[in-house]
Amino acid sequence: MTPLQLVFLLTAALTLVAAFRVVTTRNLVHAALWLVVTLFGVAVLFVLLNAPFLAVVQVVVYIGAIAVLFIFAIMLTRREMRDQGAQLNKGWWAAALVSLLTFGGLFWLTRSWDGFTRTAAPLPTGQDTLSALGKALVSPDAFVLPFEIASVLLLAALVGAVYVAYREK
Amino acid sequence: MTFWNDPIHFIAEWLRGLFIGWGMSGDVANVLIALIGAVVLASVAMVLDILLVWVERKVVARFQDRLGPNRLGPFGLFQPFADILKLIIKENITPAGADKVPYNIAPILAMTAVLLLWAVLPLAPTIFGVDLNVGALYLIAAGALGTLAIILAGWSSNNKFALIGAFRAVAMMVSYEIPMVVTLLIPTILAGTMSLNGMVKAQDVWFVVLSPLAVIIFLISAVAELGRAPFDLNEAESELVAGYHVEYSGMKFGLFYAAELLHAFTFGGFMAVLFFGGWRGPWAEQYPLLGLLYFFVKAMIGYWVFMWIRYTMPRIRIDHMLAFNWKFLTPLAFVLLMVTALVDKALAGAETWVYALGMFLANVVVAWVTVEILRAYSRRRRLEEEAPAKQVIRTGVEGQAAHH
């Protein structure tokens, strides 16, 4: 086993355990902290895939902004940090069935795909993936349209937030 | 390759030879060497931290017209060791109702967030942890972990002062991250890369000349990110006792304290790397150890500026702080970014001195327009302040009613 595989297995196990704890722990702040661990594990997986930009963005956006916002909201809105109610509702069997079917279906669909067993071709060394990504985002024959649409959507959300929070004097 | 022009790789190669000689495989030896490198880098930073305690205490003493520590050793140099001994033998108190695991993780995470920054800091042409091609963004990511440490400390202490301190810290760090990200893009545009070592190599003309405004914006948002005065609302002694670390004692408090000092020094280092030529100086290319010296001198000057600001400025109010960020610093940073990008494209093929002059003039124009806008704004506010008395007389009862 190479060190890389060892790191992958440890990270994957940690990510799964943390993701499981997010939904099973009763303390809401703890759940948010486990979520941070999960997101961090995903960032490590990005690093292992030779995608440092995505890894860093994962940490900046998901941990630095979203998870912090979650924790903030939980602390500000909940007086009781401990959730006393039942953790499952009546429809749990339907949810279990659907997730089992989805997982089974995906497994069945990808079972014959050779990507699982084939070793990926090594990345060409010395290639600047970051500037390639940047150019792809703004070049007309690549992703400029989705990129701009996403930007406009975010801008609309921003304007909406200002409108909701604005109070006429 | 000799020790003098590439010390780190020289030692690494020697170690690799040694390990493989012991019968290890190449992969395992590489991982082991990387681990040793990480431990050595972190240890150097921590040992430097001990010195910083002395520097901080000595400098604040001079700012306040005192002598500072001067009993233990020459110039009081051994004072930090006495401080550390005191912190270690103090009782570690865990408050009742504290959330134990986050409470204990928080100080470690605070220190880790700072040590992580050292991984990308280019100390000399060939001495750096790793040369990430997303170095500038990595800086923000590590800052996010620092924010998390403060929330954890504030929440898990089960103390309302700690929690208020944490809330304030988060409000501040999340909002000041925006001008910081935007100003980090300016050296990125100027250098054409996000790798920090690449930025240093691109600074034939220091970026402080090309973009003095960016330096000022970065300095202000860095002070806010560090939570130092005038942005020390998260630990405002007169309001919150000590803020988010009020319940910590002994070495757990010591870790927060050490992390804060090292964070300030590290940001001094980032100022040097991003705007003041990093390790560059006469003969630094040939002798990396000389580059190391230049880097530490520049970082120390940056650290001194942080201390200078901290011990001279009074604390500002939280609404002023947020208004200053959202209504002034963020728009200014965005305008500067756009102007820099446009000028960079316009002067793409120009000679170095034309390019530098153009950039500098663009900055001067932006600064001048900003000052003019501020002056017009403050004049309008002043007139409004003076106006009401006259208005009441002129509009009489109607004006009164409208006022209510």
Image (cartoon, coloured by chain):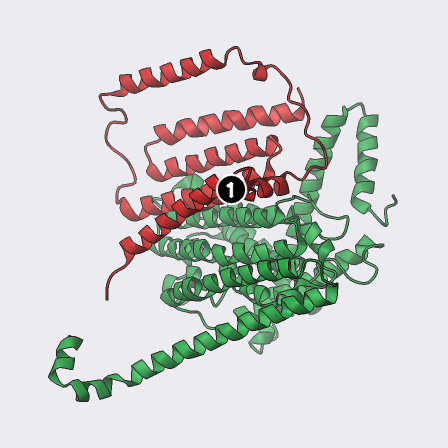
Residue denoted by label 1: A144
Residue farthest to the right, as pictured: B2
* Place of residue B284 in the rendered image (x, y in percent of width and height, measured from the top left): 81, 57
Q: Which chain is green?
A: B
Q: Is residue A6 left or right of residue B246?
A: right
Which amino acid lies under the numbered mark 1 shown in the image of this protein? Val
Determine the residue positioned at 67% across, 40% down. Answer: A128
* Place of residue B187 in the rendered image (x, y in percent of width and height, measured from the top left): 63, 57
Determine the residue positioned at 45% across, 52% down. Answer: B248
Q: Nearer the viewer, residue A87 or B255?
A: A87
Residue B60, compared with residue A77, is above or below; it is: below
Q: Tag 1, which chain?
A: A
Quadrant of the image for the C terminus of chain B? bottom left
Chain A colour as displayed: red
Residue A121, compared with residue B96, is above or below; it is: above
Can residue B271 be seen here?
A: no
* Pointer 1 local density, CA inside 10 Å: few below 14, some 14–19, many at least 20: some
